[in-house]
Image (tube, rainbow, N blue to C red):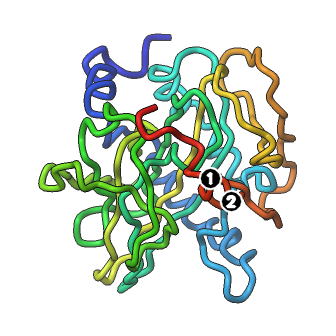
Amino acid sequence: MGNALSSTQIEEFQQQGFLAGLPVFTSAEMATLNKDLPNILNLLEAGESTKEIREWHEASRYLFDICMDKRILAYVEALLGAHFYMWASNFFIKEPYSMETVGWHQDGYYWPLKPIESATVWIAFDEVDEENGAMQVIPGSHHQGMVEHVRQESDSVLGLEADVSGFELSSAINIPLKIGSISIHDDKLLHCSPCNPSNRRRAGFTIRYSPDRVKCDLKINPHFRVFPARGELFGNHPLGKIPTQRYGRLYREHKSIEESGQESEKGFWDSKK
């Protein structure tokens, strides 16, 4: 089977830190996925946000199968290499007229993973554009390595946001996506998303993948579990169990660097690393 991405696309990812508009799910497949989505949303308890749908692929075959879709894995393999695993997923749903924002950040800052070589896939469950809060990125910002993240006074759902004072924010661009398509971005890429003042939902499902050589500090996140995606895993990774029920949820205290309190020690990362 040939490479899922062209050499030009791979070079673009390396230079810009992201790819967008990659086709995956057909309109019929997305109609089915969206029809079944309420079965997951209904598992949330009163007062819980959809952001709590985090790592539920460990309990829901519906979500697990999305994460392990062979078309997505083919794209990721072209960028991460032959041996990689899937370890995290999360819904980010902005309902119509939502004022919630996501401030500037780098995904890799929150994860106790080394080396910093992971990638995030963002699946559009709806049409995504500038009007309903499309993700924004600073192309090429991943070349600067990890930047300092600090606490900001804002409407962002994040506790820690990147210090972007050294970046030209006018260079940021929107990432519109057609329903069923995906974007993939480097874990060092600076990105954010504004509020959704439109009358349309903006639902995205993210999945995290890492090459086999990437290791997790289990002292920070003892819940870390991996699922082999392509190739073989040669490292000492704790393996997850493939779920058997179609719709299920986790009850878990999540442990990112921030959630574990490690950021109080000047963070897990050196700012130039």
> Of the numbered discs in the image, which one, if any, rests on residue 87?
none
Residue 234 percent across, percent down from the top left: 76, 14
Identify the secondary structure beneath mark 1: helix
For label 1, the residue is 265
Q: Residue at x 84, y 48 (%)?
A: 243
Going by the picture, which residue comes out furthest to the front?
A: 265
Identify which residue is drawn at 57% across, 46% down: 207
In the picture, measured across the screen, residue 64 lies left or right of residue 135, that is right
- 166 to the left or right of 247: left
* Depth check, front residue: 265 or 79: 265
Eye-nearest disc, 1 or 2 = 1
Seen in the image, is 94 located left or right of residue 251?
A: left
Is 34 located above or below residue 42 in the figure? Answer: above
**Which residue is found at the position 58% from the left and 30% from the top?**
70
Q: Pointer 2: what residue?
A: 261
At label 2, counting other C-alpha atoms closer than 10 Å, the crowd grade (few under 14, some 14-19, many 20 or more) is few
Q: Are marks 1 and 2 in contact (CB under 8 Å)?
A: yes
Instruction: Compare residues 213 and 89 and report the one nearer the observer.
Output: 213
The residue closer to the viewer here, 104 or 164, is 164
